[in-house]
Amino acid sequence: MRLPSNSTVHLRDKRSEKINKARKSVGISRSIHYKNKWALVMKHKYLYLLFLTPAIITALLFQYRPMVGIVMAFQKFDISAGSYLTSPFIGFENFKMFLLNPRFYQALRNTLGLSLMSLFIVFPLPIVFALMLNEINRVNFKRVVQTITYLPHFISWVVVATMVYKMVDPGSGMINRIITSLGNETIPFMRESQYFWSITIISSIWKELGWSAIIYIAAISSIDPQLYEAALMDGAGRFKMIWYITLPSISSTIALMFILKVSTIISSGGLFDAVYNLSNPMVNEKSYTLEMYSYYEGIMSGNYSYATAITLTQSVVGLILVIGANEIYKKITSKSVF
């Protein structure tokens, strides 16, 4: 095994020293920029307050005022009474009921399964896609690729589900035609529950990959070019620049998005629209998530208090997961997202 010479080690140390100096200079300039920006905000604070007033009023009316309905979780709510004040309080009975219901644990298992698949498969792909897109030098080609990949985000899940059903149809679907052309028998994908999670995840990737990558592309575009120039002068290749410059520079963005994604573990990874539109009674064993559980109990069966207790529990667990993930991130990196 050939050991590196003293000159090679000296060049590596010199390269890392230059990159660290460039990072420090960028950090100092950013801190000065943020201080000046905050001083400007404080100077015109009344104008900013006037500007934010409509948004604050909208949030209070449509985000915080409906939270009064949380009280239904502790009541036997009667919709005919028309008021929270007239419905009798029953304490934690609704919570006890769903915790003792076997269907709750079936829904919880499906929710955690889909959420973990979404966290470990769907979440990293936009980061990889953004890194790959950043390496394309042809601007026009990059714009075309980005446009094509984020357009599916604007397609309704109803339309996407219809397309999926048509593509995997045992009689005329494109996927099954390819399978039969290879000498195999047709597979009833949407009639067997074992394929439901995979179809949901693949559909979600196709629909949201480009749109989810936008925030990472924006974070990459804000990286100071001096860092790449310093690394290039020291002979660093593209992979080393990605590993030592790009990824560390967008690590705070990745951490923020990851923490927000962790909060959706108890809610199917944010895939309710996909699950609702792709599910059918034949795949109910895998598609019956906590959102579907509360939907059937609350909207379909009219048991609003029971459904409110389920969703309130999901919200509280999601809040705990966010705070816990942030604390772990703080201990590992000595930084905090919030």
Image: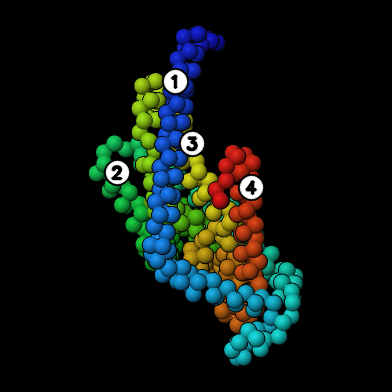
Give amino acid for label 2: Lys
Q: What residue is at 35 percent from the left and 33 percent from the top?
A: 225
Residue 218 x, y percent position in the rendering: 38, 46
Could you tell which of marks 1 and 2 lies nearer the N-terminus? 1
The Cα–Cα distance between marks 4 and 1, rounded to whole angstroms, is 34 Å
Q: Which mark is residue 248?
A: 3
Residue 155 x, y percent position in the rendering: 37, 63
**Visible in this render: residue 191?**
no
Give amino acid for label 1: Arg
The Cα–Cα distance between marks 2 and 4, rounded to whole angstroms, is 37 Å
| Vertical position of residue 93 compared to residue 191: above or below | below
**Residue that protrudes farthest toward the left in the picture:** 140
| Vertical position of residue 314 compared to residue 248: above or below | below
What residue is disc 1 on? Answer: 15
| Vertical position of residue 229 compared to residue 162: above or below | above
Q: What residue is at 36 percent from the left and 21 percent from the top?
A: 233
Could you tell which of marks 2 and 3 lies nearer the N-terminus? 2
The Cα–Cα distance between marks 4 and 3, rounded to whole angstroms, is 19 Å
Give amino acid for label 3: Pro
Count neighbours of disc 2 (C-alpha within 10 A) and say few if under 14, some if 14 to 19, many if 20 or more: some
Residue 135 x, y percent position in the rendering: 35, 36
What residue is disc 4 on? Answer: 327
Q: Which mark is residue 142?
A: 2
The one of 75 and 105 positioned closer to us in this rendering: 75
Report helix, strand or loop for mark 1: helix
Report helix, strand or loop for mark 4: helix
**Residue that protrudes farthest toward the front in the picture:** 43
Count neighbours of disc 4 (C-alpha within 10 A) and say few if under 14, some if 14 to 19, many if 20 or more: some
The Cα–Cα distance between marks 1 and 3, rounded to whole angstroms, is 17 Å
